[in-house]
Image: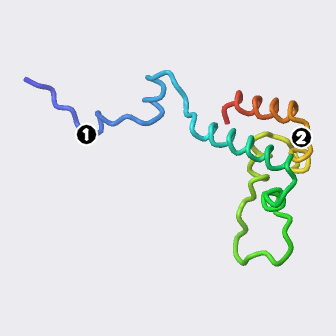
Amino acid sequence: MKSEQTYSDKKKTNDTVLEEAHTTRLLISKIRKRQATFFGHVMRREGLENLVTTGMLEGKRSRGKQREKLIEGLTDWLKAGKSLEAIEATKDRKKWRTMIANAVKQGT
């Protein structure tokens, strides 16, 4: 006689599948790394994109809940403290790259 398995016995969570494959989630880390390298590139150029990414445009803010700025998300990921520290770090490429590398190693 066959032993009957229920549907709940066949379920596996994503975490257990990742553990069985001996791997981790990489997509968010890759996205943040690419955002950070693009942000460093834009900040060194000091053009219109620089103004847009830092959010220092003239005029009124839109109504409702404000969107999170790119710089705020990156400073949280890089654990830079304040956004001004991250902006200043982009001027020195070596320092900026080490900040990105350390954040990637932490796997956040």
Please state, as top left, top right, bottom left or bottom right, where the N terminus lies in the image.
Answer: top left
Distance of mark 1 from mark 2, alpha carbons?
53 Å
Whether 37 is drawn above or below 42: the answer is above
**Residue for point 84% across, 57% down:** 47
Pinpoint residue 16: horizontal percent, then vertical percent. 44, 29
- In the picture of the structure, the residue carrying the numbered disc 2 is 89
Q: How crowded is mark 1: few (under 14 residues within 10 Å), some or many (20 or more)?
A: few
Secondary structure beneath disc 2? helix
Whether 40 is drawn above or below 20: the answer is below
Please state, as top left, top right, bottom left or bottom right, where the C terminus lies in the image.
Answer: top right
**Residue for point 11% across, 25% down:** 2
Specify the color scheme: rainbow
Q: Judge depth for marks 1 and 2 and give the one in front.
A: 2
Q: What residue type is labelled 1?
A: Tyr
Secondary structure beneath disc 1? helix
First in sequence: mark 1 or mark 2? 1
Whether 5 is drawn above or below 58: the answer is above
**Residue for point 91% across, 36% down:** 92
Q: How crowded is mark 2: few (under 14 residues within 10 Å), some or many (20 or more)?
A: some
- In the picture of the structure, the residue carrying the numbered disc 1 is 7
Q: Which amino acid does label 2 sit on?
A: Ala
Q: Where is residue 102, by image quadrant?
A: top right
Pinpoint residue 104: horizontal percent, then vertical percent. 70, 31
**Residue for point 84% across, 77% down:** 59
